[in-house]
C-alpha cells in the first residue's frame, strides 16, 4: 500500500521556514505597495530574494542544471500553497508568473543561444518577462482563433496584431508572443511562439488595463496587465521558439503545471480568508450570542473546511499524477481542480467577507481585494465552462448507449433478468407455498 499523506520532515522544515518568512517579511508589503514605485519594490525584494536563494528555495520549478531545485509538482505545490497567501510572495521566490512559466518554455524549447540570452538572466532575476497570447478581438478561451500574424520575410519574421492582458508586459524586458504563422494549417498547428524584446521598433505597450484587481490605472508596475500593439515588428528568425506551428504544444507544457501552482496558491489565499472567518466567529456578537454559535455560520465554517480539504487533496493528487505519469495523464485531474479550486477560493472568501459585514466590504481588511482577485480565477487559464466541458467529454468517452436504448439500471428489465437467473429458486419457493 503506497497511499501516504505525509511530508518528509526535511521538506516540512523548509515549508515551516517559508511560512514564517512570507508572513513576517512579505505580508507587510501589501499595506504599503501603493506608496512604492517599481524601483523601490525592486530594492525591497533584492535582500529577500538573496535570502530565499540561501535557503535553497529559489526558482524551485526548474531542474537543478538550470539553477532550480527540481522539486517536481507535488513538493512545488506545497510551496505554492505557502506563497499563495499573498500575491507578493512568488516574486521573492523566483517563481513569479509569468516569469516562471516563461522560464519553463525557454528551458523546454529554447536554443542554447536563447537560453544564454534570456533564460539564465531571467532566472538570475536580471530580466523580467511576459506572456502575450490573449487578444481583445478573439476568444482567449479558444486560442485557435488567434488573429495576430507572424509572416516570414527572408531571415526575419514580421509580427502584426494586438494583445492584451499581457501580465507584467509594462515592466518586461522581453515578451513571449503567440502568433499565427500558417492560417491554413490544422487549428492546433497554426501558431508559433516568438521572443520579442520590448524595445523592438513597432512594439508599443499602450497601457496597463485597469481591472477589478487593480481598478486605478497605474502604468509600469508588477502585476499590471498590458495592452500591446505589434505594428510590423520585425525580428530575426532566430527569435522563434521551437518549430513553426509548435506554439500550442509548447503552451500546453507550460499551462498544465501552471494550473497546479495556481490552485495551490488559491488554497493559501483561501486559508487566510478562512482564518479571518473563524477569528470573527469567536468574538462578534449578534442576536444574543457570538456569530460562531449561529448555525448558518457553523455551516459556512464546515462547508469551507470541506471545500478546501477537497480542493487540496484533488490538487495534490493532480500533482502526483503529473510527477508519476506525465502531462497527458494529468489532463483530467488538472481540469477538475481548475474549476473546483477557483470556486472553493471564491466561496470561502465570499463567506469571510460576509461575516465581517461592512468591515469586510471596506479596504480596512484585505478581503475585498481577495474577492476581486478570486473572481478572475474562474476564467483565466481557461474559463470554468471550458474545463467542465473538457472533463465531461473525457468522462463520456468511457460510456456508450445501452443495448436497445434501455437504461442499464432499468428496474423492470433487471427484474425480468433476475427472475430468469434465479428461476429455479423462485419456482421452488412457489412450489412450497
Ligand atoms: C488576472 C489575469 C491575468 C491574465 N494574464 C494573462 C497573460 O499573462 N497572458 C495572456 O495571454 N493572457 C492573460 N490573461 C487572459 C486570460 O487568459 C483570458 O481572459 C482567458 O483565456 C479568457 O479569454 P477571453 O477573456 O478572451 O474570454 P472569452 O474567450 O471571450 O470567453 C468569455 C466567456 O465565454 C464563455 N465560454 C467560452 N468558451 C465556452 C464554452 N466552451 N462553453 C461555455 N461557455 C464558454 C465563458 O464564460 C468565458 O468566461 C489574463 C487574465 C486575467 C484576468
Image (spheres, rainbow, N blue to C red):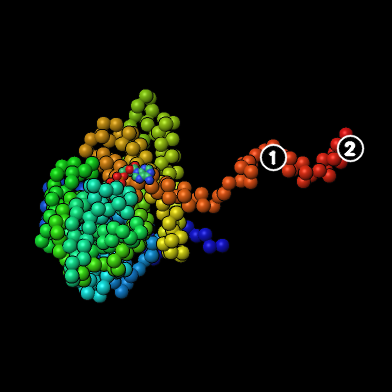
Quadrant where the N terminus sits is bottom right
> Which residue is tagged 1?
413
State left or right for residue 109 relative to residue 166: right
Name the residue located 43 percent from the left edge and 64 percent from the top edge: 326
* Mark 1, secondary structure of its residue: helix
Q: Position of residue 136 (x, y in %)?
A: 23, 47
From where the camera sits, is residue 128 visible?
no
**Of callouts 2 and 1, which one flags the residue occurring earlier in the amino acid sequence?**
1
The answer to whether the residue labelled 2 contacts the one labelled 1, judged by CB atoms less than 8 Å apart, is no
Residue closer to the observer: 344 or 17: 344
Label number found at residue 431: 2
| Cβ at disc 2 under 8 Å from ligand 1 | no
Instruction: Name the image quarter holding residue 296.
Output: top left
Camera-side residue of 56 and 391: 391
Q: Quadrant of residue 177?
A: bottom left
Classify 57 as above or below 393.
below
Q: Residue furthest right?
A: 432
Q: CA distance from mark 2 to mark 1?
A: 25 Å
What residue is shown at x 41% (from left), y 36% (from top)?
A: 300
Q: Estimate how packed mark 1 is, as few (under 14), some (14 to 19) or many (20 or more) residues with alpha carbons within 10 Å.
A: few
Q: Secondary structure at mark 2?
A: helix
Image location (x, y in percent) of residue 383: 35, 46
Quadrant of the rendered image containing residue 420: top right
Amino acid at each position: 500500500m503506497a497511499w501516504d499523506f505525509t511530508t518528509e520532515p526535511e521538506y516540512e522544515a523548509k515549508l515551516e521556514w517559508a511560512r514564517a518568512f512570507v508572513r513576517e517579511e512579505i505580508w507587510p508589503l501589501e499595506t504599503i505597495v501603493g506608496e512604492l514605485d517599481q524601483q523601490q519594490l525592486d530594492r525591497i525584494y533584492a535582500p529577500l530574494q538573496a535570502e530565499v536563494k540561501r535557503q535553497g528555495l529559489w526558482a524551485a520549478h526548474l531542474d537543478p542544471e538550470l539553477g532550480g531545485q527540481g522539486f517536481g509538482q507535488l513538493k512545488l505545490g506545497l510551496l505554492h500553497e505557502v506563497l499563495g497567501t499573498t500575491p507578493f510572495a512568488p516574486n521573492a521566490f523566483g517563481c513569479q508568473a509569468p516569469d516562471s512559466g516563461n522560464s519553463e518554455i525557454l528551458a523546454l524549447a529554447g536554443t542554447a543561444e536563447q537560453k544564454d540570452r534570456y533564460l539564465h538572466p531571467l532566472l538570475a532575476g536580471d530580466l523580467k518577462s511576459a506572456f502575450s497570447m490573449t487578444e481583445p478581438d478573439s476568444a482567449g478561451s479558444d486560442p485557435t482563433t488567434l488573429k495576430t500574424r507572424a509572416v516570414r520575410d527572408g531571415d526575419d519574421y514580421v509580427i502584426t496584431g494586438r494583445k492584451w492582458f499581457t501580465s507584467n508586459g509594462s515592466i518586461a524586458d522581453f515578451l513571449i508572443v503567440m502568433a499565427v504563422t500558417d492560417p491554413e494549417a490544422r487549428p492546433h498547428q497554426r501558431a508559433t511562439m516568438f521572443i520579442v524584446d520590448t524595445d523592438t521598433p513597432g512594439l508599443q505597450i499602450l497601457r496597463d488595463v485597469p481591472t477589478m484587481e487593480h481598478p486605478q490605472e497605474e502604468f509600469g508596475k508588477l502585476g499590471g496587465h498590458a495592452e500591446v500593439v505589434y505594428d510590423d515588428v520585425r525580428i530575426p528568425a532566430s527569435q522563434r521558439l521551437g518549430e513553426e506551428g509548435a506554439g500550442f504544444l509548447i503552451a500546453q507544457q507550460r499551462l498544465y503545471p501552471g494550473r497546479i501552482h495556481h490552485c495551490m496558491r488559491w488554497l493559501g489565499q483561501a486559508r487566510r480568508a478562512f482564518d479571518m472567518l473563524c477569528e470573527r466567529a469567536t468574538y462578534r456578537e449578534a442576536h444574543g450570542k457570538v456569530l460562531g454559535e449561529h448555525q448558518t455560520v457553523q455551516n459556512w465554517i464546515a462547508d469551507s473546511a470541506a471545500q478546501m480539504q477537497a480542493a487540496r487533496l484533488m490538487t495534490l493528487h493532480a500533482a502526483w499524477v503529473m510527477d508519476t505519469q506525465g502531462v497527458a495523464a494529468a489532463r483530467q485531474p488538472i481540469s477538475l481542480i481548475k474549476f473546483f479550486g477557483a470556486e472553493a477560493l471564491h466561496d470561502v472568501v465570499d463567506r469571510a467577507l460576509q461575516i465581517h459585514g461592512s468591515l469586510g466590504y471596506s479596504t480596512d481588511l484585505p478581503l475585498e481585494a481577495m474577492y476581486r482577485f478570486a473572481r478572475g480565477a474562474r476564467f483565466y487559464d481557461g474559463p470554468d465552462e471550458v474545463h467542465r466541458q473538457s472533463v465531461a467529454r473525457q468522462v463520456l468517452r468511457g460510456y456508450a448507449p445501452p443495448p436497445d436504448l434501455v437504461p442499464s439500471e432499468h428496474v423492470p428489465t433487471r427484474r425480468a433478468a433476475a427472475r430468469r437467473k434465479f428461476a429455479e429458486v423462485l419456482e421452488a419457493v412457489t412450489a412450497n407455498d
